[in-house]
Image (tube, grey):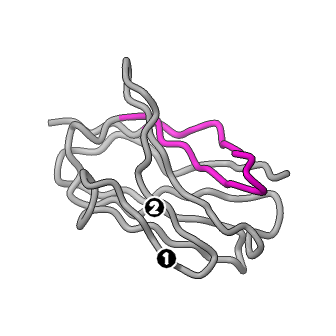
Amino acid sequence: QVQLVESGGGLVQAGGSLRLSCAASRSISGINAMGWYRQAPGKQRELVATITSGGSTNYADSVKGRFTVSRDNAKNTVYLQMNSLKPEDTAVYYCNANILWSDYWGQGTQVTVSS
């Protein structure tokens, strides 16, 4: 098991940047798949970006070239650098860890992008 705590959300103007952090309660070096998902009002939760323990990344088409996911195993933290933000990026962003085919989620952090 693992507890995940997100931070770094907030209100930003279109074109701005934010960096989200996800702090884990235990070492993440053995967790292969970690990532970020988001859920906008009235919509289903969707994948934003994932990163494996080997550093392989995967991004939703809508964020490619604008968002960067990274992990610091020494700090037990996963990051999401978000640049060139758009109003359609507005959502609650959730950190995810997949351990032995079980999903663990943080409480989410709100990102609001104004036009």
N-term-proximal mark, 2 vs 1: 1
How many labels sit on residues?
Answer: 2
Viewer-nearest residue: 37 or 14: 37
What residue sits 29% from the left and 45% below the top?
Answer: 12
Instruction: Assess whether mark 1 and mark 2 are in contact (beta carbons under 8 angstroms).
Output: no
Viewer-nearest residue: 114 or 106: 106
Element carrying mark 1: loop
Q: Position of residue 44 (x, y in %)?
A: 42, 27
Start and end of the magenta stretch? 91-110
- Label for residue 80? 2
Residue 75 falls in image quadrant: bottom right
Kindly give the residue lying farthest to the top in the view shown. Answer: 42
Q: Position of residue 33 (x, y in %)?
A: 62, 63
* SS assignment for the magenta stretch, majority: strand
Image position of 29 with respect to 77: above or below:
below
Residue of label 1: 56
